[in-house]
Amino acid sequence: MALVATHRQVVFRLLPQTRSSWRRLERTLEEQRQLYNAALEERIDRYRKTGRSLSYYDQCKALTECRRDLPEMAECPVAIQRGTLRRLDEAFKHFFRRVRNGETPGFPRFKGRAFFNSVSVVSGVKVRDGTLHVPSIGALKMRRRGGNPHPDGRPVSAVLKRELGKWHAVVCYAVEIEEPADNGHVLGLDRNGGQVADSDGGLHEMPDLDRLEAQARRLQRRLSRRRKGSRRREKAKRHLAKVRRRIANRRRNWHHHVSRRLAAKAGTVAVEGLDVKGMTRSAKGTAEAPGTMVAQKSGTNRVILNTGWTALKGMLDYKAANVIVVPAKNTSRKCHECGAVEAASRRTRDDFVCLACGHAAHADLNAAKNIRDKALERLAAMNEASGTGASARRAAFALATTDP
């Protein structure tokens, strides 16, 4: 089986052994926050005066001069400072992308202490015997349940994150892994609120999060009653963050398990091309034209976002051999047995009874089979284009792997 060179990120828990290690981490984080804000102010000031902004390379040159003139800046490794400048540059790239696409721009903001919790180390990272070595910070003990999945990988970069008073390290490894094998089996996947179904009859339900979500709602009400700036409010905020992190961890764990099972079952997984952002848009409207059924729509949006459709597809993209995106039109209304399309055939969320032939099935399983059929049609079109030249093959593959 062929090996493919790629990168994989592994999350470790950092265990600083001494108080001085904690202080170095906190001091480095504060220094990079101030550097981020200063670089943002420099970009804004340059644009106001000249009408042109600064690039990442311009600010790297200015950073070199500052390190030569200011000895206190030279104490921090340049790899960490360049990571901070790269972070700001990525924020501006996303800002200009949203402007071009007509979306809400979201200009990069100055970061307060509560909104800057990570430090990027773009080079000079070493991992030996379960210890992370970072320039100027020193050796930091790491721990991960299950150990390092890529012990032979070469560490390229790292991100040091502070979450709820605890430090974590996201280490990026350059590894060689086996390319996912294509066994020729095509599987259709229908994503619904709280569950996903595949065309082989598998129904994968999310873990029960009702108790944690109810606890988060209670803590949110408690937080709203606390006076801003008080210690009791900070305590309630930390408690709420812990509960929300547990919810996110359980959801992500479910995504990993489901995506691994699907990738092991089929070489090609077909999913619907869903506009999740449009589907979860608020229905409250405006003061002149208020929306209808706002509470019901907000509940539906919450279920869709809690299921994490986009995150599940993102995991399938690198675990499965092939992922094909098909149009979502009529996949839930069409009868897989006779092909009749009727909206009333789907009576409830789970029940599908065809009005034309009387075929009864689980609604999601019926939709998953329709998705698989559309994927097979696309694959057949790709095979027909395979004999017409390389350009036609590339166009057919691009059509099959992008959202319609």
Image: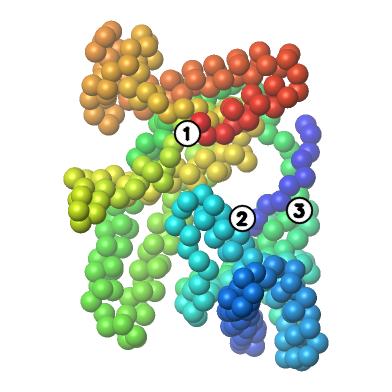
| Residue 401 can be seen in this image | yes
* Mark 2 nearby-residue class (10 Å; few <14, some 14–19, many ≥20): few
x and y percent of residue 302 in the render? 32, 50
Work out whether mark 3 precedes mark 2 in sequence or the reverse, and give the earlier one: 2
- Front residue of 84/315: it is 84
| Residue that label 3 marks | 174
User: What amino acid type is highlighted by mark number 3?
Assistant: Ala
Residue topped by disc 2: 146
Mark closer to the chain start, 2 or 1: 2
The answer to whether the residues at label 3 and label 1 have Cβ atoms under 8 Å apart is no
Residue at numbered disc 1: 273
The residue sitting at 44% across, 50% down in the picture is 251
Residue located at (50% from left, 66% from top):
107
Q: Tell me, yes or no, whether the two marked residues, 2 and 1, touch with CB atoms within 8 Å.
A: no
Q: Nearer the viewer, residue 181 or 83?
A: 83
Residue at x 30% of width, y 12% of height = 359
Element on which disc 2 rests: loop
On screen, residue 327 versus residue 284, left or right, reads: right
Amino acid type of disc 2? Gly
Give the x, y percent position of residue 86.
67, 67
Callout in the foreground (3, 2)? 3
Per the model, the C-alpha gap separating discs 2 and 1 is 35 Å
State the SS at label 1.
loop
When asked about the image quadrant of residue 90, the answer is bottom right
